Each structure stands twice: as C-alpha cells, then as structure tokens.
Image: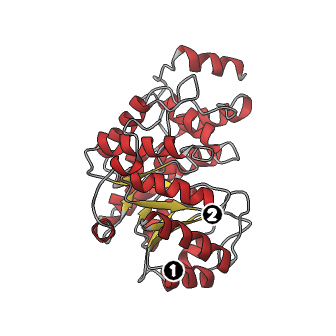
Amino acid sequence: MLSCGVYAKCGSAEPKEAVTKKLANLAGVIPPMITPFGADDKIDFKALAQEALYLKKVGCAGMVIGGSMGEGAGMSPEELAEAIRVTIEATGGTMHVFGGIIADTSAEGVRLAKAVAGAGAAGLQVPPPHFCPTGDTAILAEYYGSLTSGSGLPLIIYNVMPTAQAAVESLETIIDENPEIIAVKQSGRNIHTLAALLATVHHKVKLFSAIDDMIYPSFLLGVDGTISGTSAIFPAETVQMRNAVLAGDLDKGLALHERLAPVWRTVDSVFFAGNAKYAVTLCGQRGVLRPRRPLTWPTGAAAKSIEDALRAGGFLNGGNVPSAELAGVQAGSR
C-alpha cells in the first residue's frame, strides 16, 4: 500500500508543461524494469530500490515500472504507485520514470494512470487494451486519449500485439490527434513497421525499439533508444551497445549483439518474465528474482537452454554459484 496515503501527495508538483518539456530530448536505454517479489508474492520494495540504483549506475536513461517485463498486469493502482514512488526516491529524481499501464478497460486504465501521475511519474507506457487487443484507429485513439486526459501525463504508445499491430497510417492519425503522445515503442517482432515509422513520424515523436533480437539493427536505423526485455536483462550491455553505435564502433556493437540476441531467443516465450528473472538470477549480480505466482521459473529443457545461452555468451564464466533456493529449482528441472 502507499506509504504516503493520497496519491497527489506522493509525487512531483511540477506542472504538466514542465514534465513534458523534460521529455523533449528523451533518448537512451529505458528498461522495462524487473519487479522483485518476495516469497509472499508482495513487491520487495528494498530490492526494487536496489534494482533502480543498478540501472542508474550502468547508464540507463530511465525505466518503466509495471510493464510486461515487470509483471505489471494485475498490479493494483496502490502497488504501481508505490513502486514508482520508491523508484523515484531511490534514484533521487534524476531519471525518467514511466508507469506501465496494462488494463482491460478504459476505466481501469484511467484509475492506473491517475495513480501513476500522483506518484510523480514522468509519463505512461500503454499497450492496447489487454483483454481486447486491437489495431483499430478509433478505439485506440479513444483509449489513449482517455488516459492522457485522465492523468495529465504524456504517453508512449506500446505497439506490441503481433496479431493486432496498429498500422503506420493508424499511428499517424492517433499521434496527430493527441499532442500528449510523445513516442512509439515498436515491438511485435516487426522491424518493417519500425523502419516505416522512422520514415514517416520520427519528426513528430520519439521512436524506441522493443524488437529484442534486433536492437542492434534498430540502433543502426536511428531509433532514439530502446525499451526492451533485452535491456531489462542486460542493461549495462545494452547501454554499451548503443554507445558503441553512436561512436561508430560497429564491430563492438555487433559483438555485443551476438552475445545478447541468442540469450533473448531462449527467454522469448509466453513465460518471458519468469524466464528473464531466471537468467538474471543465474548471472548472480542482482540477487534472487522470483516471478509472481502463478508464473514460475523455467524448468527442464527451457531452463537448460537459458543456462547454455548465458554460458555461451560469457555471462556465467563457470563461476556463478546460485543460491540454495535456485539450485534446488535447477536440480528439479533435470
């Protein structure tokens, strides 16, 4: 629950114009932050603050709280708001913190968005309505409009659903009708749409890639940054890859891509959040990260494929010693 009571007392009192102005140069690696949970399935806010500090330390430009990688579906407004408040406090208000809105209806989305605004977030990241994914222009325009007007916050469109991609023309219309839309995060395994967006709307909004095994090519195409599962698992390496591209060191960027992309391919499934936490936990730098039930760590062949990819990429180096809890999961997976 919120430690500060009423949402409006938790966050920044900055006017909307000041918040939006801060986002004019939005760019860089903005991971959809992993949410640490305790054995009781409650958010471990101490571990959350530590994760936020780690992202800051390795050079990330911000983070999204409660996105799909952060298991945001099912988070209450109170949980989401408290997670944002804790993250802002932990990082000293120096980073762009966005609230992920994963809702089934406009009414639910507005409730979450208001909580996010009251906690001091810089903006929203919003996919289509979760239960009814659609690329219909009128439905999405109304949905995104209800969230920006209801919260007073700018919004990043998360164009994610592979079976319901909003077409380029649809996104153009939605962007033109709503000045509070500041960016598109292109996912859905569709780099063709990303290329088309760079050619058509990049002069109007920022563009971020979430095509996880194509982050390096996305940087080469000229996106403003990435908000991706890859950056949540490997934030330091993703920052290094972007910096290498910006510096013209394409050999270094490609070498990082060739280490990261195979790991993502083993993580990528309907259980990606649990798989990602397994990968991060195996690497041993950021503690034991449990998924929230009913989601679990992978077992059997799925677990082994992640372990093998991490080892092949040089992320385990044969020296990582997992916790007793994780070792038990590994032993039971064989």
Q: Is residue 5 above or below residue 252?
A: above
SS for callout 2: helix
Q: Nearer the viewer, mark 1 or mark 2?
A: 2
| Horizontal and vertical percent position of residue 50 | 36, 34
Residue matched to label 2: 106
Instruction: Name the residue rendered at 41%, 83% in the picture.
Output: 203
Residues 218 and 150: in front is 150
Question: Which residue is painted at 61% across and 33% down in the image?
Answer: 292
Circle 2: residue type? Ser
Mark 1 secondary-structure assignment: helix
Q: Mark yes or no: residue 188 visible.
A: no
Looking at marks 1 and 2 on the same chain, the residue that comes earlier in the sequence is marked by: 2
Image vertical order of residue 141 relative to residue 73, above or below: below
Residue 301 horizontal side relative to residue 118, left or right = right
Q: Disc 1 residue type?
A: Ile
Residue at mark 1 to residue at mark 2: CA–CA distance: 18 Å
Q: Specify the quadrant that holds the C terminus.
A: top right
7 to 332, vertically: above or below? below
| Residue 100 shown left or right of residue 253 in the figure | right
- Looking at this view, is 216 or 8 the one in front? 8
Asked whether residue 271 is in view, the answer is yes
Residue situated in front as seen by the camera: 249 or 326 = 326
Q: Residue at x 63, y 68 (%)?
A: 190
Q: What x and y, as percent, mark residue 310?
A: 54, 37
- The label number, if any, that marks residue 175 in the structure image: 1
Q: Nearer the viewer, residue 302 or 5?
A: 5
The label number, if any, that marks residue 239 in the structure image: none
Residue 286 x %, y %? 42, 31
Question: Where residue 25 sits in the image (x, y, percent)?
Answer: 31, 70
